[in-house]
Image (cartoon, rainbow, N blue to C red):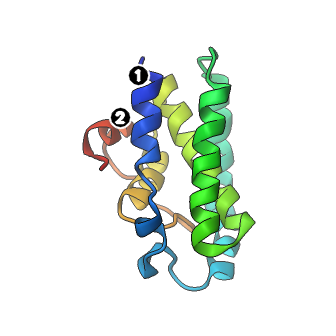
């Protein structure tokens, strides 16, 4: 569990920048194909599983306003690059999930893979294989 919400939120916020997300490599294929791959069971079932796990361990506290700012930043950054509210919503949902998992101390290889996708400047979608490592590594490696 990471005790400093501001450190976590800052690190997660640095996962996306206009330059990173507007690069051609961010989406593999078309926007529509990437969003369709998010709806496939391979991705969706894992995302829902993690969302439930994080929700069950939600540390509570006064995070709502801070998370809302993170979500708004993510949404606006993605919308500015792609003018697509569905993509912007997916990214803002992902970043909130990653931030809450970090704060709650949830460790999961699949979510680490989602995080690694963002660190590598790619939108996570489709079948994602879990990766080794700790989610909290983002606090030390994200720039």
* Furthest residue toward bottom: 29
In the image, residue 84 sits, relative to residue 50, either above or below, namely below
- Residue 138 x %, y %: 34, 42
From the viewer's side, name the closer residue of 88 and 32. 88
Circle 1: element type: loop
Q: Which residue is mark 1?
A: 2
- Residue 31 x %, y %: 63, 79
Circle 2: element type: helix
Q: Residues within 10 Å of mark 2 (few under 14, many from 20)?
A: many
Q: At x 38% / y 55%, what residue is drawn?
A: 116
Q: Is residue 17 left or right of residue 72?
A: left
Quadrant of the snapshot with the N terminus: top left
- Residue 88 x %, y %: 66, 61
Is residue 107 something one can see in this rendering?
no
From the viewer's side, name the closer residue of 122 and 63. 63
Task: Check residue 136 in the rendering and tell me which mark sits there, or answer none.
Answer: 2
Q: Is residue 49 left or right of residue 12?
A: right
* Furthest residue toward top: 61
Q: At x 26% / y 45%, what residue is drawn?
A: 141
Q: Residues within 10 Å of mark 1 (few under 14, many from 20)?
A: some
Q: At x 46% / y 40%, what residue is drawn?
A: 108
């Amino acid at each position: 569990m990471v005790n400093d919400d501001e450190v976590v939120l800052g690190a997660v916020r640095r996962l996306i920048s206009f330059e990173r997300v507007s690069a051609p490599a961010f989406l593999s294929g078309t926007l529509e194909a990437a969003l369709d791959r998010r709806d496939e069971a391979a991705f969706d079932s894992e995302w829902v599983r993690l969302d439930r796990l994080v929700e069950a361990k939600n540390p509570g506290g006064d995070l709502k306003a801070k998370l809302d700012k993170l979500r708004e930043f993510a949404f606006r950054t993605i919308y500015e690059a792609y003018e697509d509210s569905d993509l912007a919503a997916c990214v803002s949902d992902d970043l909130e999930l990653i931030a809450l998992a970090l704060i709650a101390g949830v460790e999961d290889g699949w979510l680490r893979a989602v995080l690694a996708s963002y660190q590598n400047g790619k939108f996570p979608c489709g079948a994602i294989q879990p990766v080794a490592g700790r989610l909290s590594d983002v606090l030390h490696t994200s720039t």
